[in-house]
Image (cartoon, rainbow, N blue to C red):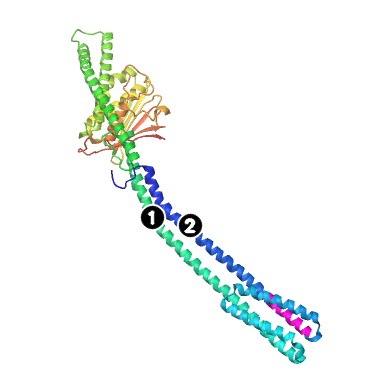
Amino acid sequence: MQWGRPKSLSGLMLVGLALIAVPLLVAILTAVLQIRELADTGQKIVIQGVTGARASQALFGQIASLERTARLYEVLKDPKLLDLYRTQDESLTTTGDQLRRQAASNTQQTLGQLADLQRSIRVALMNSAAVSAAGTASDLSARFAQLSGLVERVAAQSNAQVDAQVAALEDRTLRARKELLWWAAALLPLAVIAAFVLTIGVGRPLRQLDRAISELGEGTFTNPIAVRGPHDLERLGGQLEWLRQRLLELAHERNRFLRHMSHELKTPLANIREGTELLMDGAVGELDSNQREVAAILRENGIKLQRMIENLLSFSAWQTSSVGLDATEFRLRPLVKQVLENQQLTLLSQRVRLDVRVDDVTLLADRGKIRLILENLVSNAVKYSPKGGTIHLQARTQSLQLVLDVADGGPGIPVEDRGHVFEAFYTGRAARTPAVKGTGIGLSVVLEFVAAHGGTVEIIDGEYPGAHFRITMPIRVGSSEGPVRPELKAQAHAA
C-alpha cells in the first residue's frame, strides 16, 4: 500500500474537491465581509453627507430668521419679538449641537466659535436698552455677517470631511479588490494541482480500463490488464483481468477443438477423395454416364469439404497467432486461373458465367493467403448466384494499391446481416445451393488475411445487383512481418 494514496475513488475526489473548496470558501467569506463593511461605511458616509448638508442649509435659514427678528425688535421693541428670538435662537443651538456630534475636530472648533458668537449676540440683544439704537443696529449687522461666515466655513469643512471619507472608502475598495485578486491568483495553482491530482489519480486508471475493454472487445487477449489507482478501480481492473484470462482459455479451447476436429476429418476425407479419383479413373471398371455424374458430384463435394477444413485450420492458426506472412513475389493472373479451375465443376453445375478482367499484376504477398482469399470470395459468390447468373472478378492497380472486386448476381447482403457477415461462424441467410452448408468463417478468414496485408474490405452498393466485395491492399508488403494481428477494417459503402 502506498503512503497517502486514497483508498477509493470517492476519497480521491474528496481530496481534490477539498483543495479547491476550502480556499474558495475562505475567499468567498472574506469577500462577503469586506463587501458588507464597505457597504456599511458607504451608507454612513451618505447619511452623514445628507445630514450635514441639511443642517448647513438649516443654519443659513435660522440665522436669516434670527437677524430679521432682531432688526424688527430693534425697531418695534415688542416683547413678543424677543420671545420669538429666543425660540429661534434655541433652534439654532439645537442644529449646531446636531452638527457637532458627527463633525470632525476642526468643524467642532468652528461650531464652538459659532456658539460663542451666537451667545454674544443674544446677550447684546437682551441688553439693547442700555445701548443707543444706532450703535446696536450697526453692531448686530456686523455680528450676524460674522455668524453667516462661520456657517459657510462649517459647510465647507463638512463637505471636505465627506470628500475625505469618500476617498478613504475608495482606497479601501481598491485594497479589497487587490486582495480578492490575490486570492484568485492563489486559487489558480490550487485548481491546477487539483486537476492534475484527479487526472493522475482517476484519469490514468480510467484510460487503462478503457484500453483494456477495447482490447477485449476486439478479441485481443494477450495483453495483461493492470490498473493502478484507487482501490475500487484496481478491483475493477482485477475483474477485467480475470475475464481476459477466462476468454483466453475459451479461445484456446475453441481453437484446439477446431484443430482436432479438422485433423480428424482430413483422414476419412482423403480416403473418400482417393476412392472417388479411382472411380473416375476407371480403376474398378469403366463407368457409364450416370455413374460418372455421381462420382463427379462426390468429387466436387469432397473438394468443398477439403476447402472448408483448410479454412478451419487457417482460421485456428491465425487466431492463435502461430502463422505470419510468408511473403513471396508472384503473378496474380495464374493464381486467379488456378482458383477458377478448382471451382470449374461447381460453376458448370450451377451454369454460372464468369466476367474476369484481371490486370497482369505482380504481387509481393503471402501467396497461400491470397489464394484462400480468392477461393472464399469466389465460393461465396457461386453459392449465392442464381443458375445462369454471372460472377464478376476484376483486379486492377491504383496508386501502388491492388483493387480486387468480386461480385455476384444474387440477392445481395441484407441490411441486418451487414454488421455480422465478417464475424466468425456467422452464416446469415442460407445459400441457394445448400448441398454442403458453409462453416461461416470464409468471410472472416478473408477479413483476417486482408488485414494481415494492411488492406481493407468494403461492401459496395449500386454497381452490381448482388453482393459486391472490394479489397484494397498494398501491391508489396514487407516479408519480415511476424504473427502480428493488425486492426481489422471492414466498411459498408453506398455508391
* Other-residue count near label 2 (Cα within 10 Å), few / some / many at <14 / 14–19 / ≥20: few
Residue 326 at what x, y percent from top left?
A: 20, 33
Residue shown at 28%/14% (left/top)? 297
The residue carrying mark 2 is: 29
Which of the 4 quarters of the picture holds residue 412?
top left
Is residue 72 on the magenta stretch? yes
**Of label 2 and label 1, which has the lower sequence position?**
2
- Front in this rendered view, residue 25 or 303: 25
Q: Which residues are magenta?
A: 56-73
Q: Would you name the residue on which mark 1 appears?
A: 190
Q: Is residue 199 above or below residue 39?
A: above
Compared to residue 77, the image places residue 469 above or below, namely: above
Q: At label 2, which amino acid type do we have?
A: Leu
Are dots 2 and 1 in contact, CB under 8 Å? no
Could you say where residue 258 lies in the image, as x and y percent from the top left? 25, 23
Q: Tell me which residue sits at (38%, 49%) in the image.
A: 16
Q: Please indicate, yes or no, whether residue 244 appears anywhere in the rendered image.
A: yes
Counting from the top left corner in percent of width and height, residue 53 is at 64, 73
Task: Name the element at disc 1.
Answer: helix
Q: Give the image quarter of residue 351.
A: top left
- Gap between marks 2 and 1 measured at Cα: 18 Å
Give above or below for 87 relative to 406.
below
Q: Is residue 338 above or below residue 137?
A: above
Amino acid under label 1?
Answer: Leu
Which residue is rendered at x = 23% and y = 32% of the image?
A: 321
